[in-house]
Image (spheres, rainbow, N blue to C red):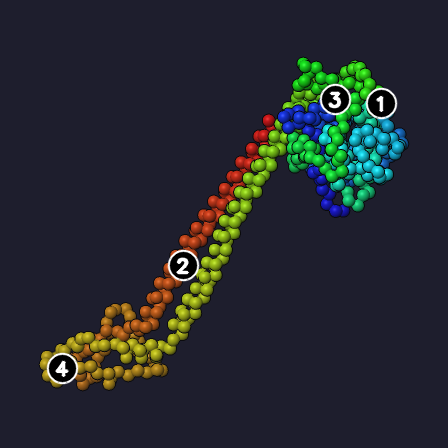
Amino acid sequence: MAQLEFCDKHNMVAYLVKSESSEGFDEIIDFLTSSHIYYALTENPIIFVSLIEQFWETAVLSTTEEGLQAISATIDGHEKLITEDSLRRHLKLDDAEGISSLSNEEIFEHLAHMGYVTNSESLTFFKGHFSPQWKFFIHTILHCLSSKKTAWDQFSSNIATTLICLATSRRFNFSKFIFEDMVKNLDTPHKLLLYPRFIQLLLNKQQRLLLPHTRTYLTPTLTSKLFSNMRRASKGYSGVVTPLFESMLVQVNDEEQQQSPSRITSSPSLSPQPTQPSPSPEPIQPIHEAEETASMPYDSPLHDVYSHGSAEGSVQQHDLTVLVTKLNDQIDGLEKDLHQTKKTYSTALTKLVLRVKKLEYKLKFGKARRKAKIEEEVHEKPSDETEVLVQEETPTEIINEHGSGKKGEMEISTANIQVSTASPPKVSTAGPHVYTRRSAKDKGNAIMEEPATPKKVKKRTQVQLSMDEELARKMEEEERIRFNAEHEARALQEEEEERLNLEAARELQR
């Protein structure tokens, strides 16, 4: 099986925060905030990579005892079932009685009321043909609730049906829509880690059966930059701004402008009609996971979840969305800093390694050359060495034991010096002088002579030794510098990584 991957443009967290950048989009933001899909659009649990991978690697289609289709997967040795009903329950969709399809004629009719103009009968539609608020509406549904992975400017008749149902106050069966997409993913040749937010929400209900996990997936979140993109005129857009349907408008009182507004419902008709406020939906009480399951080390820090009908929950959700966006930006900045730091130290380390290799080569070559010269000197013939010494030595002093006379005159004679190649004379280097005696005829007369110095050989050896010692000292110094540099580079890199990880962890814990 090919390695499964996440798709960073799929199952994203919606951005429904009003700000200066969202001017002109307040109506669609209020509509989505008050809709029954708000929780599925914005809930952002901590996603653990290994859990999502285990689910899709082991997922198979099965049938429950009641005869319903289910997706069965093995997570940490325990079987986990996901059904249409479990999705509906955990995503708070309440759409069991919802519709799942519309006729082609009705789809084209309603899209035309939304401002979509086309002469084609193709059931592939283009997001760029709509005015900004409708475009934002479609973009949010595509990225947060659909299973699309590519071609984000296009959408199918299924997505068109979801949009029309939401816009005309008809309940669409999102639970069935999501479950069927998950079933299709089981056999597709391009299988991926589909719907990670929703799967994690379901797995969190069985935390007591799961092992601790630490590697997380950072859920991508739509940001305020989306509004400027939606304002840009796309190819195919007529330039006419189409207002939202009456059934999509939400009445907001002055006291509730910063809170989640109550939704105003009206007839599904597309023509303007008087509207009356419907009773506000009962707020969903906070869900405390501790009542159902034991707390695990990887529990989400967001313990309570509130519905869109709760003012406190709406404010908290908005604040948390802003915080998550801010944290994502900070994490991106920290990752860029870490990448640059690694790049800098990697370049410095590469230069040091190349320098060390060069010095090692020089040292190896120098050792080989020195060894060769030493072997050459050691294997020189002893007779040749003796001959050189005799030829180059110079008599410096004659010790006369008998006074003056012919016998006492200073003489330098080499007639009686016999050099034998078979048995070379021993030359002592223990003292600074070598004494030789004449024959018996010249008994009493001694010649003191200084030993010959193999000047050329000695000079060459001393120079070579000096060069070798200097090279050895340089090599030792270079090795010390390289070691210190590598040690410092590694220390700085580890310190920087630890600092960035701690900062990211602190930000996520706030």
Q: Can residue 196 be seen in this snapshot?
A: no
* Image point (54%, 46%), residue name: 343
- Residue 396 lies, with reference to residue 147, above or below; the image says below
Work out which quarter of the rendered image holds the C terminus and state it.
Answer: top right
Q: Nearer the viewer, residue 335 or 375?
A: 335
Mark 1 vs mark 3, CA separation in Å:
20 Å
Residue 157 visible somewhere in the drawing: yes
Observer-side mark, 4 or 3, equals 3
Give the camera-side residue of 132 and 184. 132
Circle 1 packing at 10 Å, graded few (<14), some (14-19), many (20+), is few
The residue tagged 1 is 269
Q: Which residue is mark 2?
A: 472
- Three-letter amino acid code of the residue under disc 2: Ala
**Residue position marked by numbered label 4 in the rendering:** 409
Disc 1/disc 4 C-alpha distance (Å) = 147 Å
Please report whichever mark, 1 or 2, sits nearer to the chain's N-terminal start: 1
